[in-house]
Amino acid sequence: MRYNRAGMTLLEKVWSVPTIECEGCVRAIHRTLGDVKGVQHVEVDRIQKVVRVVFDANQVQEDTLRDCLAQAGFSPLD
């Protein structure tokens, strides 16, 4: 999904992340993605094992976010 807001191109990406196990995982994902410049919003659903990220495509690419999750020990699937 694409949104335009005041010079930003906001995109939404949803990944299935089957390696989410606990609230510690949720916090780790929030910290990992929340610290990336251009990330506007992060939602993690531990039960459904889904991560939703809204980000400014002018500042960060989807592949970078995927790599951040992988480096933190999570395996995002499209």
Image: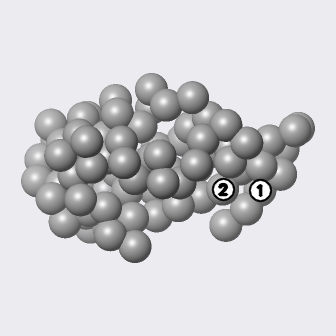
Dot 2 and dot 1 residues touching (CB under 8 Å): yes
Residue lying at 39% horizontally and 64% vertically, measured from the top left: 15
Residue of label 2: 11
Q: Residues within 10 Å of mark 2 (few under 14, many from 20)?
A: some
Please identify the quadrant where the C terminus is shown: bottom left
Residue 47 visible to an observer of this rendering: no
User: Can you say whether 31 is above or below 66 in the image?
Assistant: above
Percent coordinates x, y for residue 66 in the rendering: 40, 53
2 and 59: which is toward the camera: 59
Three-letter code, disc 1: Tyr
66 and 14: which is toward the camera: 66
Residue lying at 12% horizontally and 47% vertically, measured from the top left: 22
Query: How far is disc 2 from disc 1 in space, using C-alphas?
Result: 6 Å
User: Can you say whether 32 is above or below 20 in the image?
Assistant: above
Which quadrant of the figure has residue 1? bottom right
**Residue at disc 2, secondary structure:** strand
